Image: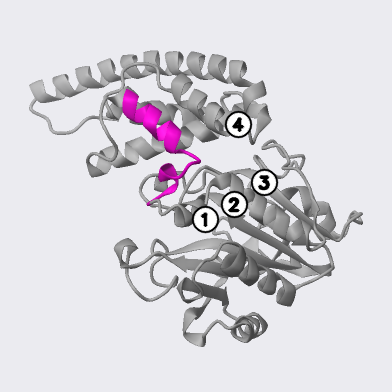
């Protein structure tokens, strides 16, 4: 199933069940507590907090999201990305756990025809109700696992609405890892859909990530997120997102620039995926108004560009890589996301200037490093001073 059909299947399912389709909000959020839009619920935060009464009690979206908290895992796992499309359905004081679980099960097993016996469920450690609802719908007890707050309690990462969650995971088979369910191996049992039961409000957390629960929200609501990338990899039998129709054209471009085929060695495989995946993030960020800077979201963009260029150089690509890679993203996804096409000239201008600047910096830094290494060797030293 191609990504266009995955999107339409999702939206058709929920709009036919009384959900209003809202467009994705930009990656630059209106919420001042957020650097970038990182979840489908961001634009609905006032509804969850009870600050605004929504005109419609049910909503569905396909939200552009950017997250760099797991950037070091990109290319080293099959499931991490810095940009992704999050397909979501939302209830603002309307339905709660029972309907959210029933909707998810019906769409996955009938709409996307996923095998029931390959779906595993995790629930929050104290959530007896969620486990019973999954068992009632037909999931055997041995494929339901209870996990703690780190895995099955969701918040935005900042003060705001939060709650326990239940995740649907798909068993990709022994080629992807160990037996034992998602509690044992998140690569084999990949999380595809997170159902968040929004019922609490959290306060400011400490450096360890712990945060106080300030109390109940005015109403119980639902926030879910089904990752398009991960579902596409499953439905298209791709090892990872770079093998799906979302990014395969960009990977092909990177292979042509490198003059050899993916995956190569283990480290080359990582570099191929980093350049490919980051090119998509870069294109979307610039299209939504983010420009390179020394801090804030502009620094996130700059870091992504420099990281992509560095990995391109590791692949032996000495020519410009960001312009052709982002151009392939635009050609492939601009029909779905017209802002990419509208900002194509700006994207090319920004990535070209940034890559040229970083290439000069990289060359100068490499010369300094090599000179320091030479001096160290001449002095028969095996270390470099700070």
Residue 244 position in % (x across, y down): 45, 45
Please tell me in which quadrant of the rendered image residue 160 appears: bottom right
Of labels 3 and 2, the one closer to you = 2
Mark 2 nearby-residue class (10 Å; few <14, some 14–19, many ≥20):
some
Q: Closer to the N terminus: mark 3 or mark 1?
A: 3
Sequence-wise, which precedes: disc 4 or disc 2? 2
Q: Tell me if residue 306 comes above or below residue 148 in the rendering.
A: above
Residue 63, label in figure: 3
Where is residue 239 shown, x and y percent of the image? 37, 52
- Residue 231 got which mark? 1
Disc 3: CA contacts within 10 A as few (<14), some (14-19) or many (>=20): many
Say if residue 210 shows up in the picture. Answer: no
The boundaries of the magenta stretch are: 239-256
Residue indicated by mark 2: 6
- Please report whichever mark, 4 or 1, sits nearer to the chain's N-terminal start: 1
Labels 3 and 2 touching (C-beta < 8 A): no
């Amino acid at each position: 199933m191609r990504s266009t059909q995955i999107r339409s299947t999702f939206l058709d399912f929920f709009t036919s069940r009384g959900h209003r389709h809202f467009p994705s909000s930009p990656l630059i959020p209106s919420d001042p507590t957020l650097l970038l839009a990182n979840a489908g619920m961001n634009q609905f935060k006032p509804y969850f907090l009870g600050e605004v009464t929504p005109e419609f009690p049910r909503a569905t979206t396909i939200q552009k999201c950017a997250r760099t908290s797991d950037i070091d895992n990109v290319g080293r796992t099959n499931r991490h990305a810095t940009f992704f499309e999050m397909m979501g359905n939302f209830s603002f004081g309307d339905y709660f756990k029972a309907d959210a679980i029933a909707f998810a099960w019906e769409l996955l097993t009938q709409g996307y025809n996923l095998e029931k016996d390959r779906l595993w469920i995790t629930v929050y450690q104290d959530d007896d109700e969620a486990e019973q609802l999954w068992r009632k719908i037909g999931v055997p007890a041995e494929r339901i696992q209870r996990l703690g707050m780190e895995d099955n309690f969701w918040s935005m990462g900042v003060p705001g609405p939060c709650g326990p969650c239940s995740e649907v995971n798909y068993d990709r088979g022994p080629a992807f890892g160990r037996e034992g369910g998602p509690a044992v191996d998140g690569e084999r049992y990949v999380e595809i859909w997170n159902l968040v039961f929004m019922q609490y409000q959290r306060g400011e957390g400490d450096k360890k990530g712990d945060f106080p629960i300030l109390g109940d929200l005015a109403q119980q609501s639902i926030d879910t997120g089904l990752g398009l990338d991960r579902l596409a990899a499953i439905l298209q039998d791709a090892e990872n997102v770079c093998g799906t129709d979302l990014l395969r054209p960009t990977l092909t471009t990177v292979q042509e620039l490198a003059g050899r085929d993916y995956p190569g060695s283990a480290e080359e495989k990582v570099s191929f995926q980093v350049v490919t995946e980051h090119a998509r993030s870069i294109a979307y960020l610039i299209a939504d108004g983010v420009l390179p800077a020394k801090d804030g979201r502009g620094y996130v963009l700059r870091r992504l560009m420099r990281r992509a260029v560095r990995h391109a150089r590791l692949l032996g690509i000495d020519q410009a890589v960001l312009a052709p890679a982002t151009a392939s993203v635009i050609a492939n996804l601009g029909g779905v996301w017209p802002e990419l096409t509208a900002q194509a000239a700006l994207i090319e201008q920004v990535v070209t200037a940034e890559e040229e600047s970083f290439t000069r910096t990289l060359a100068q830094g490499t010369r300094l490093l090599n000179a320091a290494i030479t001096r160290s060797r001449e002095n028969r030293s095996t270390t470099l001073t700070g």
